[in-house]
Amino acid sequence: MIRVAIAGTGGLARKIARFVKEETSYDFIMLSRGPNEQLKQQGYQVLDVDYNRADRLDFALMGIDTVISTIPGLAQINLIEAAARTHVRRFAPAEFEGSPTMRPVVDPLDLGRNKAACLQRLRHYGIQHTSFVCGVFYERFAPGGLGAQGVGFNTLLHREGDYVMDIRNLKAQIPYVNSLGGTVSICMTSMTDLARFVVQCLHMDAWPPELRICGERRTVLEVVQEAEHMSGRAFDKSYHSPSTLDVGLTNAIMQGDHPGMLRWQSLIATSLGRYDFDNPNFRGSTRFSDWLQAAWGRR
């Protein structure tokens, strides 16, 4: 019997836990930094852990076959160390974006999440692992942004309007062409479809280095046009090439605008193909237009 530990209690962790509970017979626990009575009252087994205490982590992972992590940074590194000590078989680190192969060695968007170090640590210990590659969450474009879904705070791009378009204020910054002159595309997935995919992959005997899901692949312009169609109003759109993105970043740096720097860095990463990929293992069932209408249609 597979026994699963889900590290974290945010929005994505809760969705994964719900599908484990509803669609499998696996025993599982949720690891929380503190008491979480709400989840316990909902019938979940929640274990309080201190990610800085090796003994507490070792106790939490005793008998665990698979860890699904939604926590970044040093806490996740400590969790990997505990997984090695307690002979955890499989570990899914907190990736949930584009392919790790598309990230630069020095990643300005990492912000202490230590994603590369976590993958290196898993390889070092020989723990079977996979990166769940899903591109951009639809929920980036939700009212309230990713933060309203209980995720993305560590990216500092969790607010409504932080990425590509501000639907409420009808504005968009569009990475339109890449350095080769081609149009810029992104893969997108709903958090719900990603969570279900993660749980379905628990049935696999072995995990490859990446498992990919894509709800829809669109050009960035098409994403904005879908929002315009939903709202029935034209957006104030700025179209960018690599050179104009660099100008935007330089201006933000000169102004000491740290949030602006991150927004421009995310657009530059988009133009470089960070969130674009082919050959998904699974197609998400939620259409972006349907999700967008449900999220914004009555507002």
Image (cartoon, grey):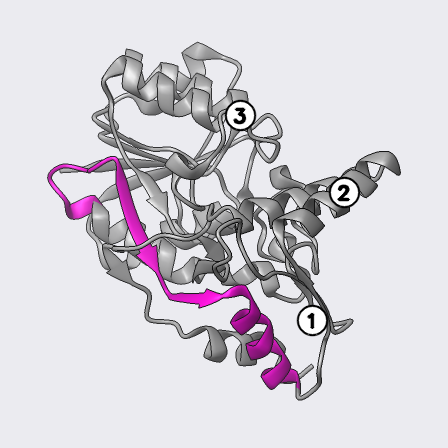
Is 275 rendered above or below residue 285?
above
Is 286 rendered above or below residue 85?
below
Q: Nearer the viewer, residue 75 or 126?
A: 126
Give the residue type at disc 2.
Answer: Pro
SS at mark 2 in the image: helix
Residue at horizontal 64%, vertical 56%? 163
Which residue is the site of mark 1? 167
Residue at horizontal 47%, vertical 45%? 274
Q: CA distance from mark 2 to mark 1?
A: 18 Å
Please tell me whether residue 150 belongs to the stretch shown in magenta.
Answer: no
| Image position of 62 (left or right of 172) | left
Give neighbour class at mark 1: few <14, some 14-19, many 20+ (Cα, 10 Å).
many
Q: Earlier in the sequence, mark 2 or mark 1?
A: 1
Which residue is the site of mark 3? 73
Q: CA distance from mark 2 to mark 3?
A: 20 Å
Name the residue furthest bottom.
232
Q: Earlier in the sequence, mark 2 or mark 3?
A: 3
Is 27 rendered above or below residue 285?
above
Image location (x, y in percent) of residue 131? 33, 38
Give neighbour class at mark 3: few <14, some 14-19, many 20+ (Cα, 10 Å).
some
| Image position of 149 (left or right of 105) | right
Region rendered in magenta: 202-231
Image location (x, y in percent) of residue 220? 54, 64
Which residue is the site of mark 2? 259
3 vs 1, front mark = 1
Please tell me whether residue 211 belongs to the stretch shown in magenta.
Answer: yes
Give the residue type at disc 3.
Answer: Gly
Give the residue type at disc 1.
Answer: Ile
Mark 3 vs 1: CB contact within 8 A = no
